Amino acid sequence: MNIANWLYQTALSWPSRPALFKGDLLRQDYQALLQSVSDRAAWMQEEHGIRAGDRVAIFAKNAPEYIEALHACWWLGAIVVPVNCKLHPREAEWIIRDSGASLTLTEDGATFVDDADIYEAALCAPVVGGHGVTAPAHVADHDLAWLFYTSGTTGTPKGVMLSHDNLRHMTLCYALDVDAARSDDHLLYAAPMSHGAGLYMFAQIRAGGAHLVPDSRGFDSDEIIRLARSRGNLVFFAAPTMIKRLIATARQQGYGGEGIRTIIYGGGPMYAHDIDEALACFGRRFVQIYGQGETPMTISVLPRDLVADQTHPRWQARRASVGIAQGAVTLAVLDSEGNPLPAGRTGEICVQGPTVMKGYWQNERASAETLKDGWLHTGDLGHLDEDGFLYLTDRSKDVIISGGTNIYPREVEEALLAHPAVFEIAVIGEPEPEWGEQVVAYVVFEPGKSAGIPELDSWCRQQIAAFKRPKRYVFVQDLPKNSYGKVLKTDLRSRTGAETTPA
């Protein structure tokens, strides 16, 4: 079944229901949204020759047209390649080329991919209307719908292949375990639609509820509070750092969460003090999820009643967990030989179920390493308690999560190693109160050479997205290594912050 059928059926059933808001302004009801999607699909087909199986990349910030573009692709049986809008154009170009995208939708249609076989157009530009409305193309359950690029420890992006069936089961998990979507909800897109926030649109569409893109097109605490008061029934996904900033603003304004129905948090560590403070300020509005691109948003869940519970003898420990397995998946903690570990023993978190990806795009080796013996090996370490609650212990892939966004040390290391004064480099993450983690670079210079922080910072900005650059530098004579010459990042993490120099 084509995931776009849900929009088609909802629009036929409740054509006059509000569908898309930009801030407080209603842009479209469901009938108008259906017409816009049909027109955009016809434009893609007639002007750019998009057909079933073609890839269409979207490299843009949140916008009402983003939802139109996603569904226009699926209407034709095409595959969406959502690209993080915060990436450097050079990084985005790599993804677009690797995916073999035939069309790239950008903010203003400006060309940044120099290739005659890749067409670029503006996401928000109007398209010619008046086309007849047709049903979405027929696709098989296993056909690809969403090609999401994530990086591993090597820093080389990998395209996670998600099928229409994967997205359908993800949505069923959402409705069963996370939050029951309602027709009077306003799904707020404060986090990037290229990631989990965009994936949550399906439940809202099926329920015939409204989608709300803030005027800022991102996260702004004051704006969210204003929209909660004016629109009501806001539901949104947020990284823990976003919640912390929202709570701080709410306390300043004497605001207690009125107009917000549900906040789903994940994508990084939520410290016990922060969720306690959030509950004290907003009450029972929070749901925690744990997932990754390879099984999107669907590993475990801590429902709102468990987040807020204070009656169970171990309620504090449970609140510090990432919850229980979501309804469509089987969850296990395995040892290095692939054997299940008993409660309390730490191992690798592994998942089975219909939400698990088909594999990595054109990367059989990485697919075989991650999908083994019927399990998705997440690379994350954790343990289960006797009641089936999952606790994250560490991230074996050394991924840094800052503000809910993954930053991969190897990418930063590669950029800095290209500087002529840098001899060796090691990048780690360390705790930071506002963002969860921040990037720290340990730098060894070439003999007789050096560079200042402004120069290194400028260099990084030219090589990688600005949010990935180190926030602190440590200049050292050498890096700790084991007998095989491998840098001991565990040793670096144990060093005190007094050694660091602010960026």
Image (cartoon, grey):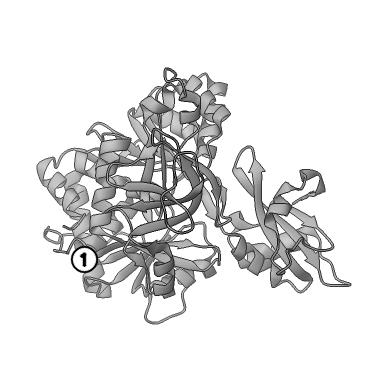
**Residue farthest to the bottom?**
116
Estimate the x, y position of residue 122 in percent, counting from the top left: 38, 63
Q: Is residue 442 above or below residue 415?
A: above
Task: Answer with left or right where residue 111 lies relative to residue 212.
Answer: right
The residue lying toward the viewer, choosing from 99 and 408, is 408
Residue 126 in view, yes or no: yes
Q: Quadrant of residue 81?
A: bottom left
Q: Residue at x 64, y 69 (%)?
A: 414
Asked if 27 appears above or below 409 in the picture, the reply is above
Q: Residues within 10 Å of mark 1 (few under 14, many from 20)?
A: many
Residue 25 lies, in percent from the top left, at 33, 38
Can you give x and y, in whole percent of width and height, for residue 53 in the image? 25, 71
Q: Is residue 82 above or below residue 232?
A: below
The residue closer to the viewer here, 404 or 257, is 404
Q: Which of 189 and 473 lies nearest the eye of the viewer?
A: 473
202 horizontally vs 115: left or right: left
> Which residue is at 52% across, 67% downward?
91
**Helix or strand or loop: what does disc 1 sit on?**
loop
Front residue of 64 and 395: 395
- Quarter of the rendering occupied by the N terminus: bottom left
Instruction: Give, as a three-letter code, the residue at label 1.
Output: Gly
Residue at image mark 1: 77
| Residue 3, quarter of picture | bottom left
